[in-house]
Amino acid sequence: MPKPQPNELFTALRAGDTVALSRAITLVESSRAEHRKQAEVLLQLCLPYAGRSFRIGITGVPGVGKSTLIEQLGLLAIAKDHSVAVLAVDPSSRKTGGSILGDKTRMEKLSVHPRAFIRPSAAGTTLGGVAGSTREAIILLEAAGYDLILVETVGVGQSETAVHSMTDLFLLLLLSGAGDELQGIKRGIMEMADIVAVNKADGDNVIRADQTRMDFKRALHLFPPPASGWTVPVLTCSALTGTGMEHLLEQIMDYRTFVNSNGFLERNRSRQLQYWFHESLQQQLMNQLTERFPDDVEAASQAVLEGRELPSAAIAALLNRLFSR
Amino acid sequence: MPKPQPNELFTALRAGDTVALSRAITLVESSRAEHRKQAEVLLQLCLPYAGRSFRIGITGVPGVGKSTLIEQLGLLAIAKDHSVAVLAVDPSSRKTGGSILGDKTRMEKLSVHPRAFIRPSAAGTTLGGVAGSTREAIILLEAAGYDLILVETVGVGQSETAVHSMTDLFLLLLLSGAGDELQGIKRGIMEMADIVAVNKADGDNVIRADQTRMDFKRALHLFPPPASGWTVPVLTCSALTGTGMEHLLEQIMDYRTFVNSNGFLERNRSRQLQYWFHESLQQQLMNQLTERFPDDVEAASQAVLEGRELPSAAIAALLNRLFSR
């Protein structure tokens, strides 16, 4: 069977064909030149539909129960007539095994629902590459009509900043316990959060979870507020029993209303687009340089690192070479 | 009188000639091509002496009493046989007036001490430019023999990240009060701090200052620790009365010993050098592009911002032009 053309993929995914949608995402993830050409034709067709979802980034310590919580959140949202897509950003993912099967079996109920779409992480060699294809996958999903897109980080300290820069709301999941709350969270993540949820507030953990909630509420109160003007709520919940999950979804929707009304969503998305453009441009410029003069770049870097040369001098020499054929 | 040659400036500043040192710093701040050439010759001579100081970044809310505190800290350090230099990073500074006179008159006692050197902010049009010349000024100061270099941020939310990336210790100054503590501090700065000091713990403010200290101590305890392994202390002090200032200096020295012993200082400086190289290279590449094709870059940026074009497509077109003369 011949491979579908970009415009055929576009028509099909717009009509709700999830096989076409999957193929489209695979296409934008590919780094092969002819695939990139086709991907750009497809994405250009989707561009007018971009921005039509609410994008939620979700991060948390390993073991916090992210998958279970995402599944519960997804099912609740679907019950309220949303259509939900779930993406993951995992720079270490490989096409053979790993998180791919893991994700699908962990979110069984959600993955079979007609109004849900779950996509394992793109296989990628660089965080920049994976972040780029995730942003493009978001455009495809928005053209396909999903109005809630959840992007989860995988692993610790790698992809939080990237996910934060492509989403409208950043949700931080915590555990409660004696000093375990932020085990494995990179410094600086706390202050990116728009909502904080202490998970596993069930069984004999209920009281401790509430204590953790109060501790973090108090701590956050001392810190500068988000630029959006929103007051960051700290909640408890249990993805297992369902406690607090409706409330979490309500807070998410309240936030969406809040940042839509005060124009922050709009401004933030502008800023994020500029950032994407700027980052991509810098990345491509750097690629051009290292492709053409790999040894020179490496040598310059070494000379600077070893204190033998100034950055400005090393760079001037490099650029001289690049621009004076 | 003819302008001194780079090697003359070098010999003079090594010998303790502060007029030569001032001229040297002015030279590295200049963006004129022939100055840049001379600056690089001079800095190359200084490179073997780079790294010989302990570099402290200092930030705080407006009105926190930064200048008074820096002066007191400087005088205490000098009393313990250190030689102290003070720099400021202020991207909005202009050569005519502004912070230049202000700084010198606010640190009167320190500025006249033979073992102190105070330099107002470089005038610069971009933060990148000012950060670059500050880093180079640090090299000159280290060649001149200053063993403690304090770099203060000016203004709010602009230069903290830059200062953090060029110093070994980041000191955050706070006020105490009803919710004023972090007024004007950008989100994310709190988690950069290695030491937090609540200033103006004097008069009827003593009790409130101590309450603030305890609140922040508790909050920080919840958050991920610094990569250095150091436990961030929260202290109170009064630059006015001198209370707690010796203790603050001790904590600074303890931190220096700590990160020297466990190798973190070394690793961190390596990372900072790489960052400086990488950032400068990206900046220069970008400059080359915008110099040669200013309208194209602007048009591409606009097309992306208005949702008419994908970043990857816009950039591919741009780079095609740049690299295929």
Image: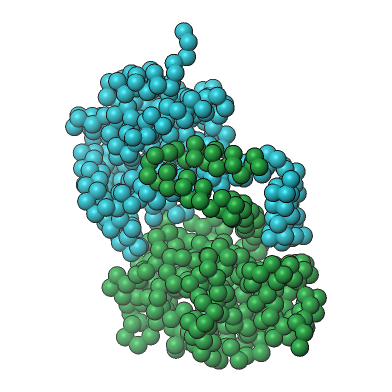
Chain colours: A green, B cyan
Q: Viewed as shown, does residue B302 lie left or right of B128?
A: right
Q: Nearer the viewer, residue B136 or A306?
A: A306
Quarter of the picture holding the N terminus of chain A: bottom right
Residue appearing at x 64%, y 72% in the figure: A30
Residue A29 x, y percent position in the rendering: 63, 72
Q: Is residue A169 visible?
A: no
Residue farthest to the top, as pictured? B1
Residue name at image x 39 percent, y 55 percent: B191
Number of marks present in the image shown: 0
Query: Which image quadrant for residue B217?
Result: bottom left
Judging depth in this view, the residue of B180 and B274 nearest the camera is: B274
Residue B215 lies, in percent from the top left, at 32, 57
Residue B273's place in the image compared with A199, above or below, is above
- Please say if B309 is above or below A108: above
Name the foreground residue: A43 vs A107: A43
Residue B159 percent location from the top left of the image: 48, 42
Q: Residue at x 30, y 30 (%)?
A: B146
In the shown orientation, is residue A224 left or right of residue B206? Answer: right
Q: Residue at x 40, y 73 (%)?
A: A61
Q: Is residue A30 visible?
A: yes
Give the residue at the far left of this rendering: B80
- Estimate the x, y position of residue B267 in percent, counting from the top left: 33, 52
- Vertical order, B218 against B179 (above or below): below
A142 horizontally vs B184: left or right: right
Depth order, front residue of B189/A88: A88
Q: Quadrant of the C terminus of chain A?
A: top right
